[in-house]
Amino acid sequence: MSKKLAAKAGLIQALNLPPMASQRAAAEPTPEPARPKTAPGSMLQFMSSQSAAIKEAEDLKERLKAFDGASPVRQLDPRSIRPSKWANRHDASFENADFAELKAEIESAGGNVQPVRVRPLAGVLNGSTGPVEYEIVFGHRRHRACLELGIPVRALVEDASDQELFEAMERENRGRKNLSAWEQGCMYRKALDEGLYPSLRKLAESVKVDVSLVSKSVSLARLPEAVVAAFPSPLDIQFRWAQPLAEALQKDPDGVLQRAKRIKEEGRVLAPVQVFDRLCKPEEGEGARDRVEVSSHRLLRQGKLAATVQSDAKGRVTVKLEPGAITPERYQQLLGWLDGFVKA
């Protein structure tokens, strides 16, 4: 009986050996341990072997806890990754010296040392480059650099909701290369316009940014295209210009837009602050050149009022014709005359 128990204990001990230990045991024969001569001795040997195996298993569990919940970094084809719908980098961000320096660093290191984060997508086609499997959570500049260099991008793959993606992207940008004021505003504006957050204040609370800063950012992002185009780059527009530009547009929208158009047409390279000053301040002689005087004229026919022509402080001109002052045929002629007369 004791011999059978000892044989079973030895078999269990062999089965509980780690893989490497089993290989060494197979490769290098070891002296057979002395067999206990009594049943209690065999039981003691069995319990000892079990205790060692249990202890080893517990040690392995403790070591694995260090990796619990960790997301392994993977090497991905940058063509399989698309920018996020909440992407906040303007194309100009990939054309400046900062991006060129980042790209050179990544090329020198053989890849992006700091991984980007992506979330998996259901496969969608990306033209001729194959399926898109991931969407960027953060790291658009690093992804773009690897894409242009034609090298794999190191990435963490983790699921994320739209709000989680938005907030992770916003935090990561503030921790690394800050967005410009205009880019920040476009990011916030899109989140509000598409209903990601119910209000500007709720957005500010979620990303832990002062509500006044979010308000200024959104104000810049809502500037007319002509005003943004007047600057050398949208990235040049500064937070502190949000209120003056908004006030100028409220007081004199036509004048601001006309000045923006002239700046663009001149084709001169101006400093951003020069563009800002010209947009906010009427130029010398601008009122006389671009607007008619405030006035009101009455046209009489046979002593009766036939028409009234008025102009207001904003340069609007109104022509009011009294009933019977013009025939249908003359009305069509008037429309044709106005179409050719109005300034292009």
Image (cartoon, rainbow, N blue to C red):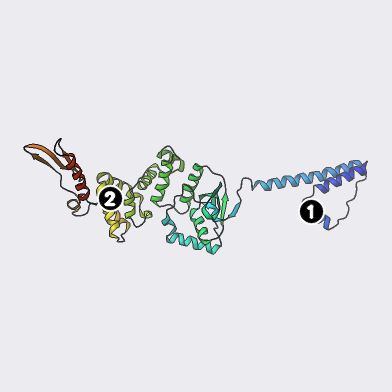
- Mark 1: which secondary structure? helix
Q: Amino acid at mark 2?
A: Leu
Residue in view at x 86 percent, y 44 percent: 9
User: Residue 110: which quarter of the image?
Assistant: bottom right
Q: Nearer the viewer, residue 271 or 227?
A: 227
Q: Residues within 10 Å of mark 1 (few under 14, many from 20)?
A: few
Residues at discs 2 and 1 in contact (Cβ within 8 Å):
no
Q: Compared to 3, does 73 lie above or below?
A: below
Residue 269: x %, y % from top left: 31, 61
User: Residue 288 or 311: which is nearer the viewer?
Assistant: 311
Q: Is residue 277 visible?
A: no
Q: Residue type at mark 1: give it.
A: Ala
Instruction: Find the residue positioned furthest to the front.
Output: 329
Q: Check residue 257 in the rendering and tell me which mark sits there, or answer none.
A: 2
Q: Nearer the viewer, residue 256 or 320?
A: 320
Residue 300: tell me if it is visible.
Answer: yes
Q: CA distance from mark 2 to mark 1?
A: 80 Å
Q: Position of residue 1 (x, y in %)?
A: 93, 41
User: Please, which residue is most extreme toward the top here?
Assistant: 323
Mark 2 vs 1, N-terminal side = 1
The x and y percentages for residue 287 are 19, 50
Coordinates of residue 180 in the picture (x, y in percent): 40, 52
- Secondary structure, mark 2, is helix
Near-viewer residue (290 or 270): 290
Q: Residue furthest left?
A: 303
Say left or right for 58 vs 256.
Answer: right
Which numbered disc covers residue 21?
1
Relative to 142, 296 lies left or right: left
Picture layout, residue 149 above or below residue 227: below
Q: Residue at x 26, y 51 (%)?
A: 258
Which tag is nearer the camera, tag 2 or tag 1?
Answer: 2
Graded by Cα atoms within 10 Å as few (under 14), some (14 to 19) or many (20 or more), the crowding at tag 2 reads some
